[in-house]
Amino acid sequence: MKILIIRLSSIGDIIQCMSVVTGLKNKFPNAEIHWVVRADMQSLVKIDPRIDTIWAFDRKEGFGGVFKLGAELKKEKFDLIYDAHSNIRSNILKLVLCPFGFCKIFNKNKLVTRRKDRFKRFLLFQFGINKLPKPFRALASFQTPLAKWEVNEFNTPFENWAFPPETEQKIEELVLSNIPQDQKWVALVPSAAWELKRWPVKYWQDLVKTRHDLHFIVLGGPGDDFCEDIRSTAPERVINLAGKTSLMESFCTVWHAPYVISGDTGFLHAADLFQKPGQAIIGPTAFGYPSNPKMKIMEVDLPCRPCTKDGSTKCKIKEERKCLMDITPRMVAEAIDL
């Protein structure tokens, strides 16, 4: 049996979608799994050795390249096709692979598509009318469509992630070799693409001070200068990796971490995929809830939540970021279970 997954981008969505591989392997253990992904994102998919073939699409080739790729994929004669993207490019691929739905004549569930519920999202953020699952679990939204294939079990542990050797070596040098023997440590993810989703820096500092029995690894991007403020709180116990690791190296750190505390970011989705214990600090957004039962949800119930898809808007109440400010450092510190 051959199964094709179409998910071209983005980082967070690819990570969430990777959770379906476990379910597919549970249901179809001998299946050959193929994945179509954007060329600049394929390194993420490569860490799962259960994916047999990766078809990398270069968006510079335009729609002509999509039709060409579709012709190549058609030769593979896939038994099942899962469109986990549902955009123009994935629709073109489906048109080539299954013209006008003809491929479903003898197998009505051969082609499955993940719907984005755009109208329901519009109702939620424009009028506060929530017709979406509550809480909206990111991984589950990719898994649910596969019920049509009777794929229902996704929580089987998987530990054979194949990070590149050079990535593993760098994390050994930067992190693992610098944690004192028998010392417990926690990965912190204080950054987010939008300020509205960020737990205050002072709260991260207070968390470090409160849990003086732990070491911490701070993950962030090159522009996240505030991560150094967190490190300076207890430099003997905190390692700041902001700007020092690539995306892949940061994900590798999450994989090695005994415990992860993160806001609604791609790193939270990685921790969810890796089934790491930890805490998800959820503020104004609606779609970042993890599915992993070992990940505690830290949130406060406010009538204005959720108010944004990704944090790119502004607070709707005078008390800015109250949904995050009311999650105190002591609450998070006391919830750490290592």
Image (cartoon, grey):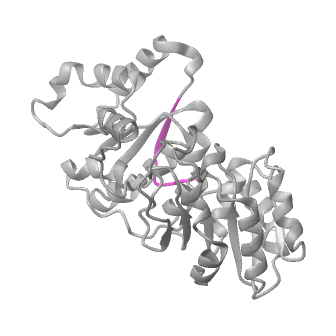
Q: Which x, y percent locates residue 328?
A: 62, 71
Q: Is residue 271 left or right of residue 74?
A: right
Q: Is residue 219 left or right of residue 277?
A: right
Q: Between residues 271 and 134, which one lies in front from this camera angle?
A: 134
177 sits left or right of 98 in the view: right
Residue at x 79%, y 68% (from the top left corner):
175
Q: Residue at x 61, y 51 (%)?
A: 320
In magenta, the rendered stretch is 47-56
User: Which residue is farthest front?
Assistant: 318
Residue that appears at 45% across and 61% down: 290
Where does the image place residue 151, in percent across and percent down from the top left? 25, 56
| 87, above or below 144, in the image | above
Q: Nearer the viewer, residue 260 or 63?
A: 260
Q: How many marks?
A: 0
Q: For this rendering, which residue is in front, 17 or 136? A: 136
* Vertical relation: 50 (above or below) 216: above
Q: Is residue 314 left or right of residue 157?
A: right
In percent of width and height, residue 96 lies at 31, 19
Extreme top residue here? Answer: 64
**Foreground of the two, 273 or 31:** 273
Counting from the top left corner in percent of width and height, residue 129 is at 30, 44
